[in-house]
Image (cartoon, helix red, strand yellow):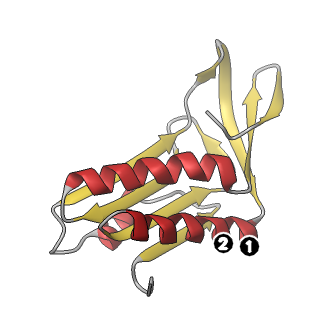
């Protein structure tokens, strides 16, 4: 399968753009767009979070993200898919990850988007550190 112009992958220390994702996945043949935004919340396990820090093995992370998209493009009738992930310090309320998928109909886009975030958390070498008022801890990126 030729995935040229169907996949957009970004790992960046810069603020992520929902508009860039939507712009990439938009296509006149698609009536369904699913966009997942994973934002930094202000607490975890009843403990106040000040911010998160993400580190990535970028070359391997991009390869794994590409595998996720390639599989989704064969498993569902989707048109385009984008995965953008932050690295570095990410503040409360900011997006740590944005995934966008387009398809002719909503079901395929929603299912592929859900698959992408679940698989990203399991397989992609991106690590998260939670920073609290009284310390910090590296945590598994799994739900």
Taking the image as shown, residue 109 lies to the left or right of residue 70, namely: left
Horizontal and vertical percent position of residue 131: 75, 31
Horizontal and vertical percent position of residue 142: 66, 37
Foreground label between 1 and 2: 2
The vertical placement of 60 against 113, above or below, is: below
User: Which label number is shown at residue 63?
Assistant: 2
Q: Residue furthest top?
A: 46
The vertical placement of 46 against 129, above or below, is: above
Secondary structure under badge 1? Answer: helix
User: Which label number is shown at residue 59?
Assistant: 1
Q: What residue is rendered at 25% in x and 51% in y?
A: 107
Horizontal and vertical percent position of residue 121: 62, 46
Residue 73: quarter of image: bottom left
Residue sitting nearer the eye, 73 or 55? 73
User: Which label number is shown at residue 67?
Assistant: none
The vertical placement of 83 against 39, above or below, is: below
Residue sitting nearer the eye, 50 or 61? 61
Report if the CB atoms under discs 1 and 2 are less than 8 Å apart. Answer: yes
Categorize mark 2 by other alpha carbons within 10 Å: few (<14), some (14-19), many (20+): few
> How far apart in space, not on screen, are marks 1 and 2 (Cα)?
6 Å
The vertical placement of 110 against 67, above or below, is: above
Image quarter (top left, top right, bottom left or bottom right) of the N terminus: bottom left
Categorize mark 1 by other alpha carbons within 10 Å: few (<14), some (14-19), many (20+): few
Residue 91: quarter of image: top right
Secondary structure under badge 2? Answer: helix
Horizontal and vertical percent position of residue 119: 58, 51
Taking the image as shown, residue 90 lies to the left or right of residue 107, namely: right
Q: What residue is rendered at 56% in x and 36% in y?
A: 40
């Amino acid at each position: 399968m030729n995935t040229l112009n169907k996949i957009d992958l970004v790992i960046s220390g810069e603020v992520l753009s929902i508009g860039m994702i939507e712009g990439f996945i938009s296509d006149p043949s698609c009536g369904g767009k699913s966009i997942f935004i994973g934002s930094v919340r202000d607490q975890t396990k009843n403990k106040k979070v000040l911010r998160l820090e993400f580190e990535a093995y970028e070359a391997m992370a991009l390869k794994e993200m590409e595998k996720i998209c390639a599989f989704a493009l064969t498993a569902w009738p989707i048109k385009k898919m984008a995965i953008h992930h932050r690295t570095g310090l990410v503040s409360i309320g900011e997006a740590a990850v944005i995934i966008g998928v387009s398809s002719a109909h909503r079901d395929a886009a929603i299912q592929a988007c859900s698959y992408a975030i679940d698989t990203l958390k399991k397989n992609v070498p991106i690590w998260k550190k939670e920073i609290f008022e009284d310390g910090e801890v590296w945590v598994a990126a799994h739900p």
